Amino acid sequence: MANIKDIARLSGYSVATVSRYINKNGYVSTKAAQAIQRVVEKVDYVPNTIARDLSTGRTKTIGVVVPFFEYSYFSQLFASITKAAFNAGYSVIALKTNYDTELERQYLEQLHQKRYDGLIFTSHTVSLETMLSYQKYGPIVCCRNLGDVPLAATYSVRNKTYDDVFELAKKGNFQGIALTLNRDYDHSPTTQAAVDCYEQVFHQKPKPEYMVTGVLGYEDGYQAAEYFLSLPTPPDFIFANSDNIAAGIFQYYRNQRQSMPTIVGQENEVVSRLMNISTIDHHYDEVGKNAVDLVINKKVQHIPVASEFIRRTGQLSSI
């Protein structure tokens, strides 16, 4: 396989000139460019991208650490990051973890090995202290509120819209308010936000029997509804952690011909528009765009993004 030295010899130009032409990083006369291009085509030369990345210190690739894609939060956020990266001329690699701390450490070590220009953590179990120790090897961005931790972060601000949902439930005099959640309180910032906002509005914690964790998608929502209807007093208001989950709950109640509780979803997915379900839009397009910008420009900033409660007609029209 021909290399730059071979092309220099065959074209009659120096290695430096050929390198500038191939890597597009300096002036090359029209005459030289034409001569070099003829040789490139003749020998069917293909640039060694790995060597070029090592020489420039850039891979034009961003690693996105994601536990799994079954949950709408992760799939939507990953899609927004991919779109923003593509528009900026970068590629994206999905680094799945299923919340395996050791895998997250391996991906940080790969950043150390310069396999990526930066890492975006959509969620994590590895400690922030560990992330900070790897920050010197490249940009690391977290998609959650980090407080005073000096790591880059961008995230949807949930408290205001969560308060809006629970204030609505309070105003409507609902007696049984249920929550479906991804993970338990100790391991999920979003669960913490939902439970804390509930407590702030009602001055007490949610009833344990009205909280279901491990709910990720439509089927989980369907099963959660089955559980809620098995309770001596089923909830009359359900705050679901995604619109797909809300749709599963809705469908189970309808299939069982049971009185429909008021349901509020999250993520502003197509299904909520079709079923006229009120929801929260966390504006992940903006979060994803911010995350990519933080990586590319190597900024250590915290960028909050306001979420939006979308109250649709139907179930909530009388409240």
Image (spheres, helix red, strand yellow):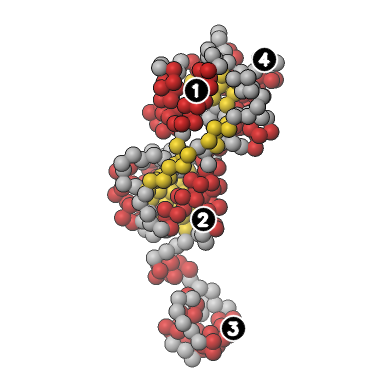
- Disc 1 element: helix
How far apart marks 3 and 1 lie (CA) works out to 70 Å
Vertical relation: 297 (above or below) 72 = below
Sequence order check, earlier mark of 4 and 1: 1
Q: Earlier in the sequence, mark 3 or mark 1?
A: 3
Disc number for residue 85: 2
- Say which residue label 3 marks: 42
Residue at point 42%, 83% (across, down): 16
Q: CA distance from mark 3 to mark 4?
A: 74 Å
- Residue 127 visible in image: no
Q: Nearer the viewer, mark 3 or mark 2?
A: 2
Q: Residue at x 45, y 84 (%)?
A: 17
Mark 4 or mark 2, earlier in chain: 2
| Quadrant of the drawing holding the C terminus | top right
Q: Amino acid at mark 3?
A: Lys
Q: Mark 1: which amino acid?
A: Phe
The correct choice, above or below, for 137 with respect to 35 in the image is: above
Q: Secondary structure at mark 4?
A: loop
* Disc 1 target residue: 166
Query: Disc 2 residue type?
Result: Ala
Query: Spatial distance from mark 4 to mark 2, Cα to Cα?
Result: 46 Å
Q: Which residue is mark 4?
A: 258
Who is closer to the viewer here, 225 or 104?
Answer: 225
Residue 194 picture quarter: top left
Which is closer to the viewer, label 3 or label 4?
4
Res 148 seen here: yes
